[in-house]
Image (spheres, grey):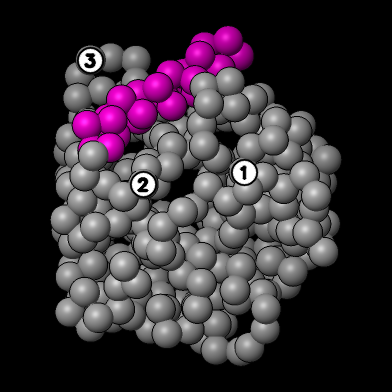
Amino acid sequence: MESTDRPSSVFKQPLYGTDGGLETTLIFNQGIALNSFAAFELLSTEEGRQALTAYYQPYLSIAAKYRLGFVMESPTWRASSDWGFKLGYTHDELFALNKQSIKFIRGLASPYASTLSHIIISGNLGPRGDGYKADNRMTAEQAKMYHLEQVKAFAMADADLITAVTITYSDEAIGIIQAARSFGLPAVISFTVETDGRLPSGELLRQAIERTDQATASYTEHYMINCAHPQHFLHQLESTGDWKNRICGIRANASLKSHAELDESETLDAGDKCLLAEGYMQLFQLLPALKVIGGCCGTDHTHMEEIWKTLEAQEALKV
């Protein structure tokens, strides 16, 4: 049963591109030091804004080349209160930066309005804790209250939706959706999984999706999977069930390493681009509703180019 207050879908096209591993690209490819992976700090300086512009533009160009829609994600994965306070920001400063992020990405996307079939402006948020662990878990109500201010900032800046990524357990997902519902904002939830295809909480993908939908009357637009290589979770998608139709997006890692191995790595593992593209081909065969394609740790625009080129060559693009 779906909620009567669920907004109409903001996804109007068959396929959407999005970006890749923002933080890993900035750190390892552009040589920019990020405190606690907090890319939102770059919004405060002209040099930082230029670095973000240089990061986003190739993805927009790729989307135009392959006639895709595009989900433009704000660089605010770490711009929630615990992380912001740790970095020395006040509540008001964080709120202003979250609003500014939406204005910034809207400005970057604006020149592509005539060449892209559809652009979605998304307020991006991350977990309260570590994106690789499910420690110090909150109840759904606690999660709602924690994420409410960041969601409010995105709503006030007229974001089209919010996208929560690297979510490690279903209660936090439920709370985020409830926060989005408070402002009538559409929401997308992206779960991260380990090498066994389970969430860090131990939940199966199916369990997390079905539990979250049941608790929120299927309010969320759809679900995504991110921060894992396709080989880590393909086997979880071989079973049948309506829950698979709720997975509409993938932002995979380039690396086959575990989260623990990536945490300890001092160099970037860019992985095998052809193997990654092959994984996306398999995902299109397993997920009938798949329509949003991007990357996560270790991926840059060249990975996305390889994926879309492979999909086009195999006539998998539903455009």
- Image mark for residue 46: 3
Q: CA distance from mark 3 to mark 1?
A: 31 Å
User: Mark 1 and mark 2 in contact (Cβ < 8 Å)?
Assistant: no
Question: Label 3 neighbourhood size at 10 Å, few (<14), some (14-19), many (20+)?
Answer: few
Q: Residue at x 70, y 31 (%)?
A: 183
Q: Residue at x 53, y 26 (%)?
A: 158
Q: Where residue 68 sits: x, y (%)? A: 29, 56
Q: Which residues are magenta?
A: 87-113
Looking at marks 2 and 1 on the same chain, the residue that comes earlier in the sequence is marked by: 2
- Which residue in the structure is indicated by mark 2? 118
Mark 1 is on which residue type? Pro
User: Which one is nearer the viewer's eye here, 254 or 264?
Assistant: 254
Res 125 quadrant in image: top right
Q: Where residue 103 sits: x, y (%)? A: 40, 22
User: Which one is nearer the viewer's eye here, 179 or 80?
Assistant: 179
Above or below, 95 relative to 148: above
- Which residue in the structure is indicated by mark 1? 186
Mark 3 is on which residue type? Glu
Res 92 quadrant in image: top right
Question: Which numbered mark, 2 or 1, is in the foreground of this view?
Answer: 2
Mark 2 is on which residue type? His
Res 309 quadrant in image: bottom left
Instruction: Assign a secondary structure to mark 3.
Output: helix
Q: Residue at x 43, y 42 (%)?
A: 120
Looking at marks 2 and 3 on the same chain, the residue that comes earlier in the sequence is marked by: 3
Q: Where residue 174 sits: x, y (%)? A: 74, 50
**Dominant secondary-structure state across the stretch colored magenta:** helix
Q: Residue at x 80, y 38 (%)?
A: 142
Q: Please identify the quadrant where the N terminus is shown.
A: bottom right
